[in-house]
Image (cartoon, rainbow, N blue to C red):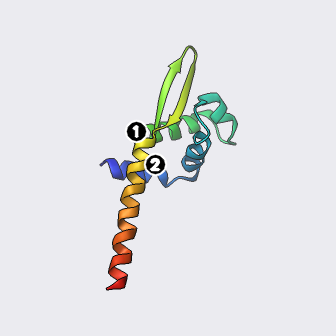
Amino acid sequence: MGLQNTMRALSDPIRREILNLLKGGRMAAGDIVDRFEVTGASISRHLSVLKEADLIRDKREGKHIYYELNASVLEEILLWIADLKGDEQHEQKQ
């Protein structure tokens, strides 16, 4: 189920853009909301989906919630995709 959650989370362009924003470092939820032309509730749901897929982590500091990438899960996905790509290239050569 983990990979299924991950792929579902990555399927949405807003969620992919949130991940791109977080490449630059952690961000407060309000700062993420300010980057989009959708409601705060919508961004909150997108953040929840990313968190459920373990692609991001959150940390409360006072009144603010900060989000950051979970690089270990992203690395696992990249390794899995690279392995698939390697197998495909191997099959094409035969």
Which residue is painted at 34% across and 51% down in the image? 3
- In the picture, residue 26 is in which quadrant? top right
Element marked by disc 2 = helix
Q: Pointer 2: residues within 10 angstroms few (<14), some, or many (20+)?
A: many
35 w.r.t. 11: above or below: above
Q: How many marks?
A: 2
Is label 1 in a helix, a strand or a loop? Answer: helix
- Relative horizontal placement of residue 24, taking residue 74 as reference (left or right): right
| Disc 2: which residue | 9
User: Residue 20: where, in percent of width, then height?
Assistant: 59, 46
Residue type, mark 1 in image? Glu
The image quadrant that residue 72 belongs to is top left
Q: Earlier in the sequence, mark 1 or mark 2?
A: 2
* Labelled pair 1, 2 in contact (Cβ < 8 Å): yes
From the viewer's perspective, tell me whether residue 29 is left or right of residue 2: right
Q: Which numbered circle lies on residue 52?
A: 1
- For the view shown, which residue lies furthest in the bottom direction? 94
